[in-house]
C-alpha cells in the first residue's frame, strides 16, 4: 500500500520499479513495471488486429471495424505524407502508431504505468525512425542523399551556412520527436496527479471538504483532455515519421 506521501507525490507514478529482480554480473536486467506494461500494450495491440480481423465479415462487428478503421487511417496518413512509395514503410509506421496509441491510453488507467512517459522509450523509437531514414536514404540514393542538406537555389556565399542549419535541423529531429511525446505524457499525468491530490486533501481537511468538487471537476476536464492528447500524440508521432521517411524517399529539395 502506498504511503500518504507517495500517494500525493506526482512524480512517484513514473518510477520504474523491479517486479522480478534479475542481475547477471554487474548488469541489471530486472523485469520491471515498465516491462510489464510494454507487454500488456503489445498484447493489446496484437489482440486488436488478430481478433479484429479473424472473421473478415462483410458486415463487421465493432472490433473488426476498429481494426479496419485504424489500418485505413494509418495507410491514408502514409500515402498522404510519403506517397505510394512510402507504403513500403507502412508496417513500421503502423506498429509505432499502434504501440504509442495503446501505451498512451493504457497510462490513463488507474494503477497503470505510462510507458511513453519514459524518455528512454520515446528516444529509442525516434532513433529507430531516424536510423531507418539514414540507412534507406544512403542505400537507395547513395551520395545523392546528401542533397537533403543542400537546398537548391541558395547563393554560394550562404550555402555553407544554410547547409549547417539543415544538418543541425536533421540531427535535432530524434530529440524533438522523442521529447514531444515524452513531455506531453509527463506533463498531463503530473497535472492529473496534482489535481487528484487536491481532491484528497480537501476531503480530509474537514472544514474545506465542500471545496473538493472544484478540483474534482478539474480532474474530469483534464482527463478528457488527456484522452484527446493520447490519440493526438500517437498521430503526430506517426505523421512526423512519415514526413521524415519522405525525405529518405525524395531527398532532393
Image (cartoon, rainbow, N blue to C red):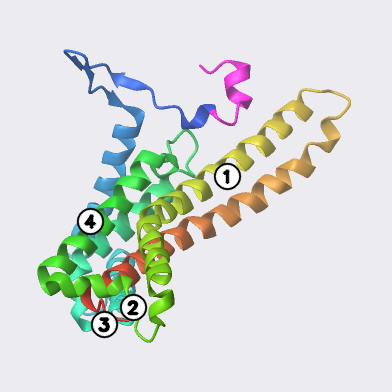
Q: Is label 3 or label 4 in front? A: 4
Residue position marked by numbered label 2 in the rendering: 81
Residue position marked by numbered label 4 in the rendering: 131
The disc at residue 165 is: none
Q: Is residue 171 left or right of residue 20?
A: right
- The answer, for residue 57, to whether it is visible in the render is no
> Where residue 200 appears, x then y in whole percent?
70, 29
The 10 Å Cα crowd at callout 4, few under 14, some 14 to 19, many 20 or more, is few
- The answer, for residue 4, to whether it is visible in the render is yes
222 w.r.t. 194: above or below? below
Q: Is label 1 or label 4 in front? A: 4
* CA separation in Å, label 2 and label 3: 6 Å
The 10 Å Cα crowd at callout 1, few under 14, some 14 to 19, many 20 or more, is few
Q: If the image is split into quadrants, where does the C terminus sit?
A: bottom left
Residue position marked by numbered label 3 in the rendering: 83
Mark earlier in primary sequence (1, 4): 4
The 10 Å Cα crowd at callout 3, few under 14, some 14 to 19, many 20 or more, is some
21 w.r.t. 49: above or below? above
Q: Are marks 2 and 4 in contact (CB under 8 Å)?
A: no
Q: Is label 2 or label 4 in front? A: 4
Q: Is residue 175 left or right of residue 96?
A: right
Q: Is residue 185 left or right of residue 41?
A: right
Label 4's element?
Answer: helix
Residue position marked by numbered label 1 in the rendering: 187
Amino acid at each position: 500500500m502506498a504511503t500518504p506521501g507517495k500517494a500525493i507525490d506526482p512524480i512517484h507514478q513514473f518510477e520504474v520499479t523491479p517486479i522480478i529482480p534479475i542481475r547477471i554480473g554487474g548488469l541489471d536486467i530486472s523485469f520491471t513495471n515498465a516491462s510489464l506494461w510494454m507487454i500488456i500494450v503489445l498484447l493489446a495491440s496484437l489482440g486488436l488486429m488478430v481478433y479484429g480481423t479473424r472473421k473478415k465479415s462483410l458486415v463487421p462487428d465493432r472490433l473488426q471495424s476498429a481494426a479496419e478503421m485504424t489500418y485505413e487511417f494509418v495507410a491514408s496518413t502514409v500515402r498522404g505524407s510519403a506517397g505510394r512509395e512510402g507504403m513500403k514503410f507502412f508496417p513500421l509506421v503502423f506498429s509505432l502508431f499502434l504501440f504509442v496509441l495503446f501505451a498512451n491510453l493504457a497510462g490513463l488507467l488507474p494503477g497503470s504505468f505510462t510507458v511513453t512517459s519514459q524518455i528512454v522509450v520515446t528516444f529509442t523509437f525516434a532513433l529507430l525512425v531516424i536510423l531507418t531514414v539514414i540507412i534507406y536514404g544512403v542505400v537507395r540514393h547513395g551520395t545523392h542523399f546528401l542533397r537533403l542538406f543542400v537546398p537548391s537555389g541558395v547563393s554560394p556565399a550562404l550555402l555553407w551556412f544554410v547547409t549547417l542549419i539543415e544538418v543541425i535541423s536533421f540531427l535535432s529531429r530524434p530529440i524533438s520527436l522523442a521529447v514531444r511525446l515524452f513531455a506531453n505524457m509527463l506533463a498531463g499525468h503530473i497535472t492529473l496527479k496534482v489535481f487528484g491530490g487536491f481532491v484528497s486533501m480537501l476531503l480530509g481537511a474537514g472544514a474545506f471538504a465542500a471545496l473538493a468538487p472544484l478540483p474534482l471537476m478539474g480532474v474530469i476536464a483534464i482527463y478528457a483532455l488527456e484522452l484527446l492528447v493520447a490519440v493526438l500524440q500517437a498521430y503526430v508521432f506517426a505523421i512526423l515519421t512519415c514526413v521524415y521517411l519522405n525525405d529518405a524517399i525524395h531527398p532532393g529539395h
